[in-house]
Amino acid sequence: MKQQTVWFYLVTLFLLGAACQTSATSPLPTPVAAIILPTETSASPLLPATAVLTATSMTPSPESRPSATAVLPTTTPTAAATATIRPYPTLDYAVATPATAVPSPVPPFPKPAHITNIVLLGNDVKYAQGGRTDSIIIVSINRQTKTAVLLTVPRDLYIVIPGWKMTRINLALPHGHGANYPGGGGGLIKDSIEYNLGIPIDYYARIGFDGFRQVVDALGGVEIINNCPLTDWRLSAPDLNPELEESWEQFTLEPGIHQMDGDLALWYARSRRTTNDFERGQRQQQLLRAIFNQGLRLELLPELPQLWQTYQETIETDMTLPLLLELAALAPAIQENGIQHLVLAGESVQAWREPGSGAAVQLLQWEEASAILARVMQPPTLSRANRPPLRVEVVTDDAIMYRQMAHNLAWYGFAPSWSQPTESLPAHTRIEYFAPNRKESYDWLLSWLFHQQPDDIVLMPTAEQSNIYRVTLGTDANPCLSQLEAPLGAND
Protein backbone atom coordinates (compact mmCIF):
# COMPACT_ATOMS: atom_id res chain seq x y z
CA MET A 1 0.00 0.00 0.00
CA LYS A 2 1.11 3.56 -0.59
CA GLN A 3 1.64 5.74 2.45
CA GLN A 4 -1.50 7.82 1.93
CA THR A 5 -3.46 4.63 1.37
CA VAL A 6 -2.44 3.16 4.70
CA TRP A 7 -3.22 6.36 6.54
CA PHE A 8 -6.60 6.65 4.87
CA TYR A 9 -7.36 3.07 5.76
CA LEU A 10 -6.27 3.44 9.39
CA VAL A 11 -8.47 6.46 9.90
CA THR A 12 -11.44 4.99 8.06
CA LEU A 13 -11.37 1.63 9.76
CA PHE A 14 -11.00 2.79 13.32
CA LEU A 15 -12.60 6.18 13.37
CA LEU A 16 -15.56 5.13 11.20
CA GLY A 17 -14.95 7.85 8.69
CA ALA A 18 -12.46 9.81 6.67
CA ALA A 19 -12.44 12.80 4.43
CA CYS A 20 -11.92 12.96 0.73
CA GLN A 21 -11.36 16.28 -0.98
CA THR A 22 -14.45 17.53 -2.71
CA SER A 23 -13.62 20.38 -5.05
CA ALA A 24 -15.11 20.41 -8.52
CA THR A 25 -12.80 19.23 -11.29
CA SER A 26 -14.75 19.29 -14.51
CA PRO A 27 -14.14 22.22 -16.85
CA LEU A 28 -17.35 21.48 -18.73
CA PRO A 29 -20.81 23.03 -18.34
CA THR A 30 -23.16 21.58 -15.75
CA PRO A 31 -25.54 18.99 -17.23
CA VAL A 32 -29.11 20.17 -17.52
CA ALA A 33 -30.68 17.50 -15.33
CA ALA A 34 -30.82 18.27 -11.62
CA ILE A 35 -31.06 14.98 -9.76
CA ILE A 36 -31.68 14.74 -6.02
CA LEU A 37 -29.88 11.79 -4.51
CA PRO A 38 -30.28 9.80 -1.35
CA THR A 39 -27.56 8.92 1.09
CA GLU A 40 -26.18 5.43 0.70
CA THR A 41 -24.64 3.08 3.24
CA SER A 42 -22.62 -0.03 3.48
CA ALA A 43 -23.11 -2.98 1.19
CA SER A 44 -24.64 -5.18 3.88
CA PRO A 45 -28.44 -4.85 4.01
CA LEU A 46 -28.50 -6.17 7.57
CA LEU A 47 -26.05 -3.70 9.06
CA PRO A 48 -27.78 -1.75 11.85
CA ALA A 49 -27.69 2.00 11.48
CA THR A 50 -29.76 4.94 12.54
CA ALA A 51 -31.58 7.96 11.27
CA VAL A 52 -30.13 10.97 9.56
CA LEU A 53 -31.58 14.05 11.20
CA THR A 54 -31.87 17.40 9.52
CA ALA A 55 -33.09 20.24 11.67
CA THR A 56 -35.51 23.07 11.17
CA SER A 57 -35.26 26.71 12.96
CA MET A 58 -32.67 29.76 14.41
CA THR A 59 -29.27 31.47 14.19
CA PRO A 60 -26.23 31.51 16.46
CA SER A 61 -26.02 34.19 19.07
CA PRO A 62 -24.18 37.17 17.69
CA GLU A 63 -22.43 39.89 19.54
CA SER A 64 -21.78 43.04 17.55
CA ARG A 65 -18.12 43.73 16.95
CA PRO A 66 -16.81 47.27 17.35
CA SER A 67 -17.93 49.75 14.70
CA ALA A 68 -19.60 47.08 12.58
CA THR A 69 -23.00 47.03 10.95
CA ALA A 70 -24.79 43.82 11.89
CA VAL A 71 -26.18 42.00 8.89
CA LEU A 72 -26.44 38.50 10.32
CA PRO A 73 -29.48 37.28 12.26
CA THR A 74 -29.22 38.36 15.89
CA THR A 75 -31.05 35.75 17.93
CA THR A 76 -29.38 34.63 21.15
CA PRO A 77 -28.66 30.90 21.30
CA THR A 78 -30.11 28.76 24.07
CA ALA A 79 -27.89 25.69 23.97
CA ALA A 80 -29.15 22.96 26.26
CA ALA A 81 -25.83 22.72 28.06
CA THR A 82 -24.45 23.94 31.36
CA ALA A 83 -20.74 23.52 30.64
CA THR A 84 -18.53 26.55 31.12
CA ILE A 85 -17.53 28.50 28.04
CA ARG A 86 -13.74 28.68 28.04
CA PRO A 87 -11.88 31.76 26.82
CA TYR A 88 -10.91 32.06 23.17
CA PRO A 89 -8.53 34.42 21.37
CA THR A 90 -10.33 37.52 20.12
CA LEU A 91 -10.62 38.32 16.44
CA ASP A 92 -7.74 40.06 14.72
CA TYR A 93 -9.36 43.33 13.76
CA ALA A 94 -6.33 44.27 11.70
CA VAL A 95 -7.53 41.59 9.29
CA ALA A 96 -10.28 42.61 6.90
CA THR A 97 -13.45 41.02 8.25
CA PRO A 98 -16.89 41.49 6.72
CA ALA A 99 -19.07 44.00 8.56
CA THR A 100 -21.23 41.42 10.28
CA ALA A 101 -22.42 40.57 13.74
CA VAL A 102 -19.93 38.25 15.42
CA PRO A 103 -21.53 35.26 17.18
CA SER A 104 -20.53 34.64 20.79
CA PRO A 105 -19.18 31.19 21.70
CA VAL A 106 -21.96 28.73 22.42
CA PRO A 107 -22.03 26.74 25.67
CA PRO A 108 -20.47 23.35 24.97
CA PHE A 109 -22.70 20.31 25.19
CA PRO A 110 -21.83 18.10 28.17
CA LYS A 111 -19.27 15.47 27.22
CA PRO A 112 -19.22 12.26 29.28
CA ALA A 113 -15.87 10.61 29.96
CA HIS A 114 -16.79 7.58 27.82
CA ILE A 115 -17.17 9.74 24.68
CA THR A 116 -14.27 10.32 22.30
CA ASN A 117 -14.75 13.02 19.64
CA ILE A 118 -12.49 13.19 16.60
CA VAL A 119 -12.68 15.55 13.64
CA LEU A 120 -11.56 14.05 10.33
CA LEU A 121 -10.36 16.46 7.67
CA GLY A 122 -9.51 16.00 4.04
CA ASN A 123 -7.91 18.22 1.44
CA ASP A 124 -6.42 17.82 -2.01
CA VAL A 125 -2.79 18.62 -1.33
CA LYS A 126 0.10 16.76 0.24
CA TYR A 127 1.11 19.34 2.81
CA ALA A 128 -0.94 20.49 5.79
CA GLN A 129 -0.68 24.22 5.15
CA GLY A 130 -1.88 24.00 1.56
CA GLY A 131 -5.41 23.76 0.31
CA ARG A 132 -8.67 23.79 2.19
CA THR A 133 -10.23 21.02 4.26
CA ASP A 134 -13.27 20.61 2.07
CA SER A 135 -14.37 17.45 3.91
CA ILE A 136 -15.09 17.80 7.63
CA ILE A 137 -16.61 14.87 9.51
CA ILE A 138 -16.97 14.76 13.28
CA VAL A 139 -16.88 11.21 14.65
CA SER A 140 -18.20 10.63 18.16
CA ILE A 141 -17.40 7.19 19.59
CA ASN A 142 -19.32 5.99 22.64
CA ARG A 143 -17.20 3.40 24.43
CA GLN A 144 -20.02 2.60 26.85
CA THR A 145 -22.73 1.68 24.33
CA LYS A 146 -20.19 0.74 21.63
CA THR A 147 -21.86 2.97 19.06
CA ALA A 148 -20.76 5.85 16.87
CA VAL A 149 -22.19 9.03 15.39
CA LEU A 150 -20.96 10.77 12.23
CA LEU A 151 -21.74 14.43 11.58
CA THR A 152 -20.85 16.07 8.27
CA VAL A 153 -20.14 19.79 8.61
CA PRO A 154 -20.57 21.93 5.47
CA ARG A 155 -17.23 23.07 4.10
CA ASP A 156 -18.54 26.62 3.56
CA LEU A 157 -20.09 27.06 7.01
CA TYR A 158 -19.40 30.71 7.89
CA ILE A 159 -18.04 30.82 11.44
CA VAL A 160 -15.81 32.64 13.88
CA ILE A 161 -12.26 31.32 13.65
CA PRO A 162 -10.76 32.32 17.02
CA GLY A 163 -7.88 34.76 16.82
CA TRP A 164 -8.51 35.45 13.14
CA LYS A 165 -11.82 36.41 11.53
CA MET A 166 -15.22 35.21 10.37
CA THR A 167 -14.81 33.03 7.31
CA ARG A 168 -15.39 29.51 6.01
CA ILE A 169 -14.63 26.67 8.39
CA ASN A 170 -12.52 24.93 5.74
CA LEU A 171 -9.81 27.59 6.20
CA ALA A 172 -9.26 26.96 9.92
CA LEU A 173 -6.67 24.18 9.66
CA PRO A 174 -4.31 25.78 7.11
CA HIS A 175 -4.55 29.15 8.86
CA GLY A 176 -3.75 27.59 12.24
CA HIS A 177 -0.56 26.06 10.87
CA GLY A 178 0.54 29.26 9.19
CA ALA A 179 -0.31 31.51 12.17
CA ASN A 180 1.45 29.35 14.78
CA TYR A 181 -1.80 28.91 16.69
CA PRO A 182 -1.43 26.92 19.95
CA GLY A 183 -1.72 23.31 18.83
CA GLY A 184 -1.29 24.38 15.20
CA GLY A 185 -4.02 23.85 12.68
CA GLY A 186 -5.41 20.97 14.69
CA GLY A 187 -5.78 23.20 17.74
CA LEU A 188 -7.54 25.89 15.71
CA ILE A 189 -10.04 23.58 14.03
CA LYS A 190 -10.86 22.05 17.44
CA ASP A 191 -11.41 25.48 18.99
CA SER A 192 -13.43 26.64 15.98
CA ILE A 193 -15.79 23.67 16.26
CA GLU A 194 -16.29 24.05 20.01
CA TYR A 195 -16.76 27.84 19.74
CA ASN A 196 -19.40 27.65 17.01
CA LEU A 197 -21.00 24.21 17.40
CA GLY A 198 -20.53 23.47 21.10
CA ILE A 199 -18.90 20.08 20.47
CA PRO A 200 -15.62 19.52 22.36
CA ILE A 201 -13.10 17.76 20.12
CA ASP A 202 -10.46 15.44 21.59
CA TYR A 203 -8.40 14.67 18.49
CA TYR A 204 -8.04 15.57 14.86
CA ALA A 205 -6.72 13.75 11.82
CA ARG A 206 -5.96 15.10 8.36
CA ILE A 207 -5.28 13.19 5.18
CA GLY A 208 -4.51 14.22 1.64
CA PHE A 209 -6.46 13.36 -1.44
CA ASP A 210 -3.85 11.22 -3.16
CA GLY A 211 -4.59 7.92 -1.47
CA PHE A 212 -8.34 7.63 -1.95
CA ARG A 213 -8.24 5.65 -5.20
CA GLN A 214 -5.49 3.40 -3.88
CA VAL A 215 -7.24 2.52 -0.62
CA VAL A 216 -10.38 1.41 -2.45
CA ASP A 217 -8.37 -0.62 -4.93
CA ALA A 218 -6.20 -2.09 -2.16
CA LEU A 219 -9.35 -3.34 -0.44
CA GLY A 220 -10.52 -4.98 -3.67
CA GLY A 221 -13.11 -2.30 -4.32
CA VAL A 222 -16.27 -1.53 -2.38
CA GLU A 223 -19.90 -2.35 -3.03
CA ILE A 224 -22.25 0.62 -3.21
CA ILE A 225 -26.02 0.43 -3.50
CA ASN A 226 -27.15 3.42 -5.53
CA ASN A 227 -30.87 4.13 -5.33
CA CYS A 228 -31.17 7.17 -7.60
CA PRO A 229 -29.55 7.92 -10.96
CA LEU A 230 -26.52 10.18 -10.64
CA THR A 231 -25.36 12.13 -13.70
CA ASP A 232 -22.20 14.22 -13.86
CA TRP A 233 -19.12 14.78 -15.98
CA ARG A 234 -16.35 12.21 -15.67
CA LEU A 235 -12.95 11.69 -17.26
CA SER A 236 -13.30 9.20 -20.10
CA ALA A 237 -10.20 7.45 -18.71
CA PRO A 238 -8.39 8.10 -15.39
CA ASP A 239 -5.07 8.93 -17.06
CA LEU A 240 -6.42 11.65 -19.37
CA ASN A 241 -5.52 15.30 -18.94
CA PRO A 242 -8.32 16.90 -16.88
CA GLU A 243 -7.47 20.32 -18.33
CA LEU A 244 -8.62 19.25 -21.80
CA GLU A 245 -12.32 19.51 -22.56
CA GLU A 246 -12.25 16.48 -24.84
CA SER A 247 -11.13 14.32 -21.90
CA TRP A 248 -14.56 14.58 -20.32
CA GLU A 249 -17.85 12.82 -20.96
CA GLN A 250 -21.23 12.85 -19.31
CA PHE A 251 -21.68 9.75 -17.19
CA THR A 252 -24.76 8.35 -15.42
CA LEU A 253 -24.59 5.87 -12.57
CA GLU A 254 -27.88 4.01 -12.74
CA PRO A 255 -29.73 2.71 -9.67
CA GLY A 256 -28.55 -0.70 -8.60
CA ILE A 257 -25.67 -2.50 -6.92
CA HIS A 258 -22.23 -1.39 -8.09
CA GLN A 259 -18.80 -2.80 -7.32
CA MET A 260 -16.67 0.35 -7.39
CA ASP A 261 -12.96 0.58 -8.01
CA GLY A 262 -10.99 3.56 -6.72
CA ASP A 263 -11.65 5.71 -9.77
CA LEU A 264 -15.43 5.26 -9.74
CA ALA A 265 -15.58 5.63 -5.96
CA LEU A 266 -13.67 8.91 -6.20
CA TRP A 267 -16.08 10.19 -8.84
CA TYR A 268 -19.02 9.15 -6.64
CA ALA A 269 -17.54 10.97 -3.64
CA ARG A 270 -16.74 14.17 -5.53
CA SER A 271 -19.73 14.58 -7.83
CA ARG A 272 -21.88 17.60 -7.04
CA ARG A 273 -22.72 19.36 -10.30
CA THR A 274 -26.22 17.86 -10.44
CA THR A 275 -26.67 17.63 -6.68
CA ASN A 276 -25.10 19.78 -3.93
CA ASP A 277 -22.50 19.78 -1.18
CA PHE A 278 -24.92 18.35 1.39
CA GLU A 279 -25.83 15.30 -0.68
CA ARG A 280 -22.22 14.79 -1.66
CA GLY A 281 -21.29 14.75 2.02
CA GLN A 282 -23.78 11.96 2.60
CA ARG A 283 -22.38 9.94 -0.32
CA GLN A 284 -18.97 10.30 1.31
CA GLN A 285 -20.37 8.89 4.55
CA GLN A 286 -21.78 5.99 2.53
CA LEU A 287 -18.40 5.25 0.99
CA LEU A 288 -16.71 5.44 4.37
CA ARG A 289 -19.16 2.94 5.79
CA ALA A 290 -18.47 0.66 2.84
CA ILE A 291 -14.69 0.94 3.39
CA PHE A 292 -15.17 0.34 7.12
CA ASN A 293 -17.20 -2.83 6.52
CA GLN A 294 -14.81 -4.10 3.86
CA GLY A 295 -11.87 -3.58 6.21
CA LEU A 296 -13.59 -5.63 8.90
CA ARG A 297 -14.42 -8.39 6.42
CA LEU A 298 -10.76 -8.61 5.40
CA GLU A 299 -9.72 -8.91 9.08
CA LEU A 300 -6.78 -6.53 8.76
CA LEU A 301 -6.75 -5.47 12.42
CA PRO A 302 -3.68 -7.52 13.41
CA GLU A 303 -1.55 -5.62 10.87
CA LEU A 304 -2.14 -2.21 12.45
CA PRO A 305 0.93 -1.88 14.71
CA GLN A 306 3.27 -2.73 11.85
CA LEU A 307 1.49 -0.39 9.45
CA TRP A 308 1.54 2.41 12.00
CA GLN A 309 5.27 1.99 12.62
CA THR A 310 6.04 1.96 8.92
CA TYR A 311 3.87 4.86 7.81
CA GLN A 312 3.45 7.14 10.81
CA GLU A 313 5.50 9.91 9.19
CA THR A 314 2.65 10.50 6.72
CA ILE A 315 0.09 10.97 9.48
CA GLU A 316 -0.97 14.42 10.61
CA THR A 317 -2.81 13.77 13.84
CA ASP A 318 -2.53 14.11 17.60
CA MET A 319 -3.79 10.56 18.15
CA THR A 320 -1.54 7.73 19.28
CA LEU A 321 -1.24 4.09 18.31
CA PRO A 322 -2.63 2.88 21.70
CA LEU A 323 -5.71 5.03 21.14
CA LEU A 324 -6.22 3.66 17.63
CA LEU A 325 -5.88 0.11 18.91
CA GLU A 326 -8.41 0.81 21.65
CA LEU A 327 -10.88 2.14 19.11
CA ALA A 328 -10.11 -0.74 16.77
CA ALA A 329 -11.20 -3.22 19.42
CA LEU A 330 -14.64 -1.53 19.42
CA ALA A 331 -15.10 -1.67 15.66
CA PRO A 332 -17.00 -5.00 15.37
CA ALA A 333 -19.37 -4.06 18.21
CA ILE A 334 -19.97 -0.63 16.68
CA GLN A 335 -20.81 -2.27 13.38
CA GLU A 336 -23.36 -4.45 15.16
CA ASN A 337 -24.90 -1.85 17.48
CA GLY A 338 -25.23 1.02 15.07
CA ILE A 339 -23.76 4.12 13.46
CA GLN A 340 -25.87 7.26 13.37
CA HIS A 341 -25.51 9.54 10.35
CA LEU A 342 -26.13 13.24 10.86
CA VAL A 343 -25.70 16.25 8.59
CA LEU A 344 -26.03 19.98 9.05
CA ALA A 345 -28.40 20.75 6.22
CA GLY A 346 -31.95 21.89 5.50
CA GLU A 347 -33.14 24.64 7.79
CA SER A 348 -30.20 24.19 10.17
CA VAL A 349 -28.21 26.38 7.78
CA GLN A 350 -29.10 29.41 5.70
CA ALA A 351 -27.56 30.37 2.38
CA TRP A 352 -25.89 33.79 2.51
CA ARG A 353 -23.52 35.95 0.48
CA GLU A 354 -20.40 37.32 2.11
CA PRO A 355 -20.40 41.13 1.88
CA GLY A 356 -17.80 42.48 -0.48
CA SER A 357 -16.66 39.23 -2.03
CA GLY A 358 -20.17 37.93 -2.71
CA ALA A 359 -18.97 34.41 -1.87
CA ALA A 360 -21.73 31.88 -1.21
CA VAL A 361 -21.57 30.58 2.36
CA GLN A 362 -23.84 28.93 4.93
CA LEU A 363 -24.92 30.53 8.21
CA LEU A 364 -25.70 28.27 11.13
CA GLN A 365 -29.32 28.51 12.32
CA TRP A 366 -28.81 27.66 15.96
CA GLU A 367 -32.28 26.66 17.11
CA GLU A 368 -32.66 24.08 14.36
CA ALA A 369 -29.01 23.02 14.31
CA SER A 370 -28.90 22.48 18.05
CA ALA A 371 -31.35 19.59 17.71
CA ILE A 372 -28.77 17.85 15.52
CA LEU A 373 -25.69 18.92 17.44
CA ALA A 374 -27.18 17.67 20.72
CA ARG A 375 -27.40 14.17 19.20
CA VAL A 376 -23.72 13.90 18.35
CA MET A 377 -22.76 12.60 21.80
CA GLN A 378 -25.93 10.56 22.34
CA PRO A 379 -26.38 6.88 21.43
CA PRO A 380 -28.13 6.29 18.08
CA THR A 381 -31.89 6.30 18.43
CA LEU A 382 -32.45 2.76 17.14
CA SER A 383 -29.18 1.33 18.40
CA ARG A 384 -29.37 -2.34 19.24
CA ALA A 385 -27.38 -1.51 22.35
CA ASN A 386 -30.44 0.34 23.68
CA ARG A 387 -33.48 -1.66 22.53
CA PRO A 388 -34.61 -4.71 20.59
CA PRO A 389 -34.33 -4.16 16.84
CA LEU A 390 -37.33 -3.00 14.85
CA ARG A 391 -37.53 -5.79 12.31
CA VAL A 392 -38.91 -5.25 8.83
CA GLU A 393 -39.86 -8.21 6.64
CA VAL A 394 -39.73 -7.09 3.01
CA VAL A 395 -41.89 -9.21 0.71
CA THR A 396 -40.83 -9.13 -2.95
CA ASP A 397 -39.64 -11.41 -5.73
CA ASP A 398 -37.06 -8.86 -6.91
CA ALA A 399 -33.68 -9.49 -5.26
CA ILE A 400 -32.18 -6.18 -6.41
CA MET A 401 -35.18 -4.19 -5.20
CA TYR A 402 -34.94 -5.94 -1.84
CA ARG A 403 -31.27 -4.98 -1.50
CA GLN A 404 -32.09 -1.37 -2.31
CA MET A 405 -34.95 -1.18 0.18
CA ALA A 406 -32.97 -3.05 2.83
CA HIS A 407 -30.15 -0.59 2.29
CA ASN A 408 -32.43 2.34 3.18
CA LEU A 409 -33.90 0.50 6.17
CA ALA A 410 -30.50 -0.42 7.62
CA TRP A 411 -29.17 3.13 7.19
CA TYR A 412 -31.94 4.38 9.47
CA GLY A 413 -31.61 1.62 12.07
CA PHE A 414 -34.23 -0.95 11.08
CA ALA A 415 -33.32 -4.66 10.76
CA PRO A 416 -34.54 -5.89 7.34
CA SER A 417 -35.16 -9.45 6.15
CA TRP A 418 -36.39 -10.85 2.85
CA SER A 419 -39.44 -13.03 2.14
CA GLN A 420 -40.71 -14.37 -1.16
CA PRO A 421 -44.37 -13.55 -1.90
CA THR A 422 -46.99 -16.28 -1.63
CA GLU A 423 -49.47 -14.39 -3.81
CA SER A 424 -49.44 -11.80 -6.56
CA LEU A 425 -47.81 -8.56 -5.55
CA PRO A 426 -50.17 -5.59 -5.18
CA ALA A 427 -50.08 -2.42 -7.25
CA HIS A 428 -49.62 -0.31 -4.11
CA THR A 429 -47.06 -1.10 -1.41
CA ARG A 430 -48.72 -2.46 1.74
CA ILE A 431 -47.30 -1.96 5.24
CA GLU A 432 -48.47 -3.91 8.32
CA TYR A 433 -47.23 -3.57 11.89
CA PHE A 434 -47.59 -6.50 14.29
CA ALA A 435 -47.85 -5.15 17.85
CA PRO A 436 -50.48 -4.26 20.49
CA ASN A 437 -50.17 -0.57 19.60
CA ARG A 438 -48.02 1.92 17.70
CA LYS A 439 -45.95 2.99 20.70
CA GLU A 440 -42.26 3.37 19.74
CA SER A 441 -43.06 2.01 16.29
CA TYR A 442 -41.25 4.82 14.45
CA ASP A 443 -44.08 4.70 11.94
CA TRP A 444 -43.31 8.28 10.92
CA LEU A 445 -39.89 7.15 9.71
CA LEU A 446 -40.80 3.74 8.33
CA SER A 447 -43.65 5.14 6.25
CA TRP A 448 -41.40 7.86 4.80
CA LEU A 449 -38.92 5.24 3.63
CA PHE A 450 -41.66 3.79 1.41
CA HIS A 451 -43.15 7.13 0.24
CA GLN A 452 -46.23 6.72 2.42
CA GLN A 453 -47.89 8.32 5.46
CA PRO A 454 -48.09 6.86 8.99
CA ASP A 455 -51.85 6.46 8.58
CA ASP A 456 -51.23 4.13 5.66
CA ILE A 457 -49.71 1.55 8.02
CA VAL A 458 -52.19 -1.12 9.12
CA LEU A 459 -51.90 -2.12 12.78
CA MET A 460 -52.16 -5.89 13.20
CA PRO A 461 -52.90 -6.27 16.95
CA THR A 462 -50.94 -8.94 18.80
CA ALA A 463 -50.68 -9.86 22.45
CA GLU A 464 -46.96 -9.13 22.58
CA GLN A 465 -44.79 -6.24 21.47
CA SER A 466 -43.22 -8.17 18.60
CA ASN A 467 -41.72 -5.12 16.87
CA ILE A 468 -42.22 -6.57 13.40
CA TYR A 469 -43.21 -4.77 10.22
CA ARG A 470 -44.23 -6.57 7.06
CA VAL A 471 -43.83 -4.51 3.90
CA THR A 472 -45.22 -6.06 0.73
CA LEU A 473 -43.69 -4.14 -2.15
CA GLY A 474 -46.07 -3.12 -4.89
CA THR A 475 -45.34 -2.14 -8.45
CA ASP A 476 -45.11 1.46 -7.16
CA ALA A 477 -42.08 0.64 -4.95
CA ASN A 478 -39.29 3.18 -5.38
CA PRO A 479 -36.06 3.15 -3.31
CA CYS A 480 -35.03 6.65 -4.43
CA LEU A 481 -35.27 9.13 -1.56
CA SER A 482 -33.91 12.57 -0.80
CA GLN A 483 -32.28 11.94 2.55
CA LEU A 484 -32.20 15.66 3.24
CA GLU A 485 -36.00 15.49 3.48
CA ALA A 486 -36.01 12.77 6.14
CA PRO A 487 -38.51 13.49 8.94
CA LEU A 488 -37.10 14.74 12.22
CA GLY A 489 -39.18 12.66 14.56
CA ALA A 490 -42.47 12.35 16.32
CA ASN A 491 -43.84 11.66 19.79
CA ASP A 492 -44.50 7.93 19.88
Image (tube, rainbow, N blue to C red):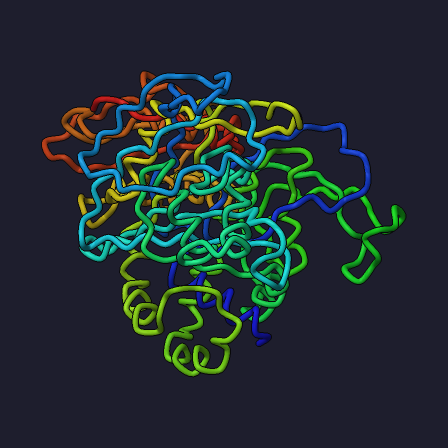
* Residue 127, position as x, y percentages in the image: 60, 63
Spot occupied by residue 167 in the image (x, y as percentages of width and height):
53, 35
Instruction: Residue at the far left: name it.
Output: 463
Give coordinates of residue 248: x percent, y percent. Answer: 82, 47
Check the image and report above or below for 285 versus 85: below
Q: Nearer the viewer, residue 282 or 70?
A: 70
Tell me what residue is drawn at x 18 percent, y 49 percent: 112
**Front position in the image: 380 or 45:** 380
- Residue 382 appears at what percent x and percent y? 26, 41
Q: Residue 444 lies in what quarter of the image?
A: top left
Residue at image point 17% right, 26% down: 439
Query: Does 413 sit above or below residue 336?
Result: above
Name which residue lies at 54% across and 44% down.
170
Name the side, left or right, on which 224 lies relative to 116: right
**Quarter residue 411 falls in:** top left
Q: Residue at x 32, y 63 (%)?
A: 331
The total number of labels drawn is 0
Query: Dividing the picture into quarters, in which one does residue 128 lie?
Result: bottom right
Q: Quadrant of the N terminus?
A: bottom right
User: Measured along the vertical axis of the image, is residue 27 above or below residue 218?
Assistant: above
Residue 299 seen in render: yes
The quadrant of the image that shows the C terminus is top left
Query: Is residue 419 something one can see in this rendering?
Result: no
Residue 160 located left or right of residue 393:
right
